[in-house]
Image: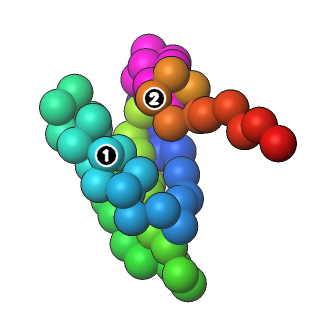
Amino acid sequence: MKKWMWFETSWRTLKEDMREFLQAHGIKYELSGCGVGWHFEVLCSPEDVELINNWLDRDTITEVRA
């Protein structure tokens, strides 16, 4: 069963990368502006949630060093 999930970012590059990722995987989404960023509503199956979370962890999380 698919459910609407949400994701927000204030990073333009992440917004564009997320749009490309969702389109490439045929995942339905709606995108709108919110304040100084963007709000995604994404229609996800449990498998889609895992796919998206893995992509976010692998391709967008970086280590910060002092």
Q: Residue at x 43, y 57 (%)?
A: 40
User: Which segment is the magenta one?
Assistant: 45-56
- Whether residues under marks 1 and 2 lie with C-beta atoms below 8 angstroms apart, the answer is yes
Could you tell me what secondary structure mostly forms the magenta stretch? helix
Q: Is residue 47 left or right of residue 17?
A: right
Q: Which residue is mark 2?
A: 59
The answer to whether residue 49 is visible is no
Report the label total. 2
Q: Is residue 30 left or right of residue 36?
A: left
Q: Residue at x 43, y 19 (%)?
A: 51
Q: Residue furthest front?
A: 66
Q: Which residue is mark 1?
A: 17
Mark 1 element type: helix
Q: Position of residue 2 (x, y in %)?
A: 42, 30
Q: Is residue 13 above or below residue 24?
A: below
Question: Which quadrant of the figure contains the N terminus?
Answer: top left
Q: Residue at x 53, y 60 (%)?
A: 9
Q: Residue at x 38, y 41 (%)?
A: 43
| In-front residue for pair 2/50 | 50
Q: Is residue 31 magenta?
A: no
Mark 2 element type: helix
Q: Amino acid at mark 1?
A: Asp
Question: Which quadrant of the figure contains the C terminus?
Answer: top right
